[in-house]
Image (spheres, grey):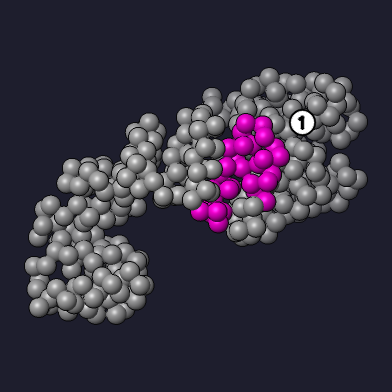
Amino acid sequence: MAEPFDGRGNVEIAEGHFDAATVDINQAITLNPKLPEAYYGRGLLKKAKGDHAGAMADYSQAITLNPKYAEAYCGRGNLKGAKGDMDGALADFNQAILLDPKMPQAYVGRGNVKNRKGDIDGSIADYTQAIVLQPKDSTTYVRRGMGKIAKGDSDGAIADYTQAIAINSNYAVAFGVRGIARWSTGDMDGALADYNQSLALDPKNSEIYLARGDVNAVMHNWPAALADYRQFCNLSQTGQDYPRLCIYLIRCRTGEREAAGKELSAYVAARKNTAPGDWSGKIAGYLLGSVTEADLFAAAGAADSKGAEAQTCEAWYFVGMRKLLDGDIKAAIDYFKKCVATEQEKNVEFKMAQSELSTLGS
């Protein structure tokens, strides 16, 4: 009989004994090549081992043998989504839900697809239904919270992240994203506390060092901000341009302008950047004196309309910082005010300009 081998294989999958499970489930298929559960189990094993094409074939065979196999549709939907076949994934999740309306993982999967397709309201609705069916799944609260952030509902997101943490107090990601949400509401102390806890749980998360560095910089905690930006650069080989600019500014304002210039110049010379226009390179050039203010603003406006608004906000801030470092306080205040006037509230530079104005009494 095939079923005992399949049953033992499923137990071995649950225990993480994948090699033993593979032997048992293959034996089940040999004994009964029309047993859909065995193909589904083998699909799980292949997915766990990174053989997504093999897993896809096994899920499809399980569906062929049993067209009402909801779990197989859900498994195949996840694989299609991972391959970028959003329409195919959506069709599989819809079928899984039609067959079993009480399967939380199908709603989560469909919510993920809707999110990637830009249907944020639809994704939130699916995550909510998954939570109704499985209220102790902390990851679904985080997913829904991210959807709420995308809709501008920071308070709702914070509530979801807080619930995720209540379920799993060791959930580093939940602390990290709650810190980001708190930062967006202006709660610097709360954001800092969450970033600290996130890093205590996961000290290798480079993005949280970057986020904490931004908070520390806005709060003018210069040594802490400098340490965070450097740690980000130590952990991440990509995305260093803006942290390097911040390192330069912090070192300048703490009396190391010459050394800061040498460090930034060495970084720019060694980096490889093929981005159109190399905007961050233009900023570095301006701070180091090789790009004029007029050329910087011209480059800022050369992007598409949305990008131009964000880059213009950044230009006002970095020019203001150079004025401040040069001792031209009046001009610096004027530029910081123009940065804030762009209303690019999601930009770190917007918040930093606000902080500078507060410090300068303007």
Give me the residue at 61% from left, 42% from top. 179
Q: Position of residue 325 (x, y in %)?
A: 86, 35
Instruction: Write down the residue under mark 1.
Output: 355
Q: Is residue 274 visible?
A: no
Q: In the rendered view, tell whether residue 26 sits above or below residue 323.
A: below
Label count reads 1
Determine whether, in the image, residue 280 is placed left or right of residue 91.
right
Quadrant position of the C terminus in the picture: top right
**Residue type, mark 1 in image:** Ser
Give me the residue at 29% from left, 80% from top. 20
Whether the magenta-drawn stretch holds residue 163 is answered as no
Q: Is residue 232 visible?
A: yes
Picture quadrant of residue 312: top right
Determine whether, in the image, residue 11 is placed left or right of residue 288.
left
Q: Position of residue 310 (x, y in %)?
A: 61, 29
Q: In the rendered view, tell whether residue 270 sits above or below residue 286.
A: below
Mark 1 surroundings: few (<14), some (14-19) or many (≥20) residues within 10 A? some
Q: Main secondary structure of the magenta part?
A: helix
Looking at the image, which is closer to me, 57 or 122?
122
Picture quadrant of residue 341: top right
Task: Please tell me whether mark 1 sits on a helix, a strand or a loop.
Answer: helix
Determine whether, in the image, residue 58 is placed left or right of residue 181.
left
Q: Position of residue 207 (x, y in %)?
A: 60, 50
What are the residue bounds of the magenta stretch?
A: 168-196
